Amino acid sequence: MISRRLFLQTGTATIAISTAGGFAQASEPAGEPVYLGVSGPLTGPNAQYGAQWKQGFDLALDQINGSGGIKGRPLRYLFEDTQSDPKQTVAVAQKFVADKRIVAELGDFASPASMAASPIYQRAGLVQFGLTNSHPDFTKTGDFIWSNSVSQADEQPLNAAFAVKRLGFKRIAVLHLNTDWGRTSKDHFVAAAKNLGAEIVATEGYLPEEKDFRSTLVRVRDANPDSLFLVSYYADAALIVRAARQTGLAVPVAASSSIYSPKFVELGGEAAEGVFTAARFFPADPRPEVQTFVTSFKAKYGKEPDAFNAYAYDTMVLFGQVLREAPELDRRTVRDTLARVKDVPSVVYGKASFDTKTRRVAGARNAELVVKGGSFTLWGGGKATN
């Protein structure tokens, strides 16, 4: 039996907040807490993403509760570990909808795991908010299903344009996770790349637990591509680029934004050099909201944040504003207020607003990146070479 662990975010009694004169101590609100439910992986193959979410959530809660909380009440979250498994997300959804303290739910990590639970949240009238759910069908279940993640139907054509028009890819081999997310993303990328005049010479799916890509890459090499595009997470992408070198597949590599993490560079080593991606968040972005977030994150955790930290932080900031503006803290009013909020401060988007028809965030922006000198850097342009 798979065990489930319950995590309660309690906050701290006092935190430091910035003032004109430096730092001052602010007491956490003392009222009855306002709770969000979080469904996501804290164990299993995607455990690192749940850990990254918690870091972003906790930093935002420091700031929200340090500035008065929600109508004088602290904001907290209940995190249920699902391993991003659809069977477990359904059980968690049933638990969350029965817990009347919870005013909205965040998660799950993978779209299929989230979508398995969506009908439960929709029937119960509890907002399900997918902070990393890019499957085009995620928000289609109903008017309580929302996301600040860009749909793959929008992201993959941007990736195709980056690969074909900006990087000069012409004969592309595509490797993709053989999951619902991976297949959907691959299909959108392939269709867009073909429309731009590229030829797709090979497509190869692989299972999430796969570790040895050499035979797959030999087949890809024999198709004579001039480039490789990966629909992957950072751990498997790192294994793929290492194996590509071992099999003599010396072509430029680009990947979906899901590889963007310092861990990709760490795990990929020298083989990660020269890999391209387009990310929604980049810590060297000079925008003031990005630099303020990066500085705060480094002060709390002693390291630089990545996109998953940023999405989690943005999501908690968003709900802080929604809950402050909501006339009542009941589930339907929270949904209605989410539909009305405009220009919420956002690390990822600058200012976040929602398209109320699709219930997705509007105004996505991209930073074009390449791994250079052991880290992701802004790409300066020019045709990709290996």
Image (tube, rainbow, N blue to C red):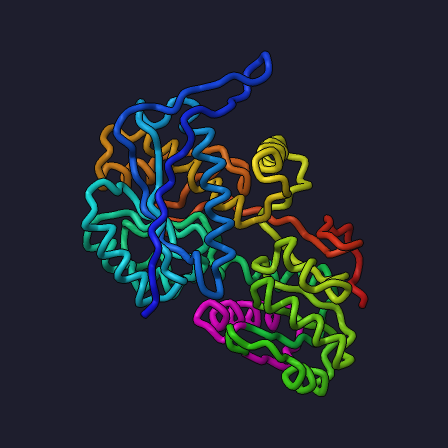
Q: Farthest residue to the top: give it.
A: 21
| 194 drawn magenta | yes
In percent of width and height, residue 240 lies at 66, 72
Say how many tags the image has: 0
| Residue 19 x %, y % | 55, 16
Residue 161 locus on image (x, y percent): 64, 61
Q: Is residue 53 visible?
A: yes
Q: In this view, does 279 lie above or below 338?
A: below
In the shown orientation, is residue 343 left or right of residue 73?
right
Q: Horizontally, is 191 left or right of 58 in the view? A: right
The quadrant the C terminus occupies is bottom right
Asked whether the viewer can see residue 201, the reply is no
| Residue 137 screen position, x and y as percent | 37, 62
Q: Quadrant of residue 259?
A: bottom right
Q: In this view, does 351 lie above or below 70?
A: below
Magenta span has 156?
no
Please state which of residues 134 and 105 is positioned toward the viewer in this rendering: 105
Q: Quadrant of residue 36?
A: top left
Residue at 23 percent across and 30 percent down: it is: 328
For the point 32% across and 61% down, the residue is 89
Q: Nearer the viewer, residue 96 or 319?
A: 96
* Residue closest to the eye, 383 or 95: 95
In the rendered image, which quarter contains the N terminus? bottom left
Magenta-drawn segment: 177-205
State the residue at coordinates (53%, 41%): 349
Asked whether 198 or 11 is in front, the reply is 11
Where 207 falls versus 75 (above or below)? below
Residue 191 shown left or right of residue 105 in the figure: right
Residue drawn at x 32%, y 52% as measured from the top left: 145
